[in-house]
Amino acid sequence: MTITAESKFVELIRSWLVSLPHDLKIAFDARDDENLPRPAREIATGVVIYMLSPKDAMGTATSTGNDLVVSYADDAVLLRLALQKALDKGEDQQAFRDRFPELFEDLEENLKLCKSVMGDLMTWLESKVPTLASQPYKGKKVAVYIDNDEAREQLFEDGLVFRTDYPVDEKTIGDKLKRAATVIDVMKRRRADELRAKGTKAS
């Protein structure tokens, strides 16, 4: 990894962390866009659910400030991987992408940069995308959060809580993210926790 690639990656992740609440709203917009194909809306709903679901103990009182800030990095990257997959082709998909250039402009190039720095951690996140539309949330399937008005509203309310309580902005991120290793180390721990929960070991 070159110094230039690392500095670009760090700056990219910093910007993605700060914009995550806004990006979550874009995923909600994709869920609610009836012009989009059903599979695209299900992936968008699935990534919303992933972000709102409890994951691990990261961010507890025993975590450092760095961990708390960076623990959202996998959400930021996975959201983009999911929306890239959901909206990869088609006129309606392109029309949606055109509405949000702040997220989709240079997305492919930015994800390639992440891959070059993150290596197999990126592969780990990419492997989650096909499972997003099948994960349950509060005992309900993804489809319910598209088709049922009450469930749709509940998910939206949970999203508002996330956005309100989200602890990262330009001020809080401060100097907590200066090196790629800060992101990579936290993601490795999260992956290891996930593998342990499934009864397997990280390589």
Image: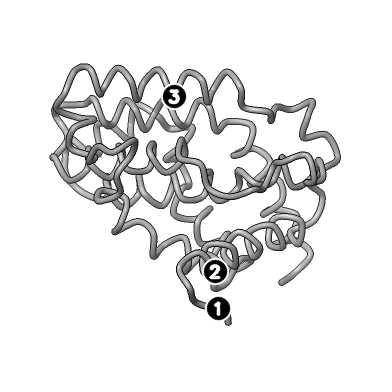
- 106 with respect to 73 (left or right): left
- Which quadrant would the N terminus be assigned to in this image? bottom right
Q: Are marks 1 and 3 in contact (CB under 8 Å)?
A: no
**Closer to viewer: mark 1 or mark 3:** 1
Q: Which residue is mark 3?
A: 159
Between the residue at mark 1 and the residue at mark 3, the CA separation in whole angstroms equals 32 Å
Q: Amino acid at mark 1?
A: Lys
Q: How is the image coloured?
A: one colour
Sort mark 3 into few (<14), some (14-19) or many (20+) by Cα contacts within 10 Å: many
- 12 with respect to 42 (left or right): right
Disc tally is 3
- 23 with respect to 134 (left or right): right
Q: Amino acid at mark 2?
A: Arg
Q: Which of marks 1 and 2 precedes in the sequence? A: 2
- 147 with respect to 173 (left or right): left
**Closer to viewer: mark 2 or mark 3:** 2
Q: Residue at x 51, y 20 (%)?
A: 161
Q: Could you tell me residue 64's position as x and y percent?
A: 82, 45
Q: Could you tell me residue 165's position as x and y percent?
A: 61, 22
Q: Which of marks 3 and 1 precedes in the sequence? A: 3
Sort mark 2 into few (<14), some (14-19) or many (20+) by Cα contacts within 10 Å: few
Q: Secondary structure at mark 1?
A: loop
Q: Which residue is mark 1?
A: 201
Q: Secondary structure at mark 3?
A: helix
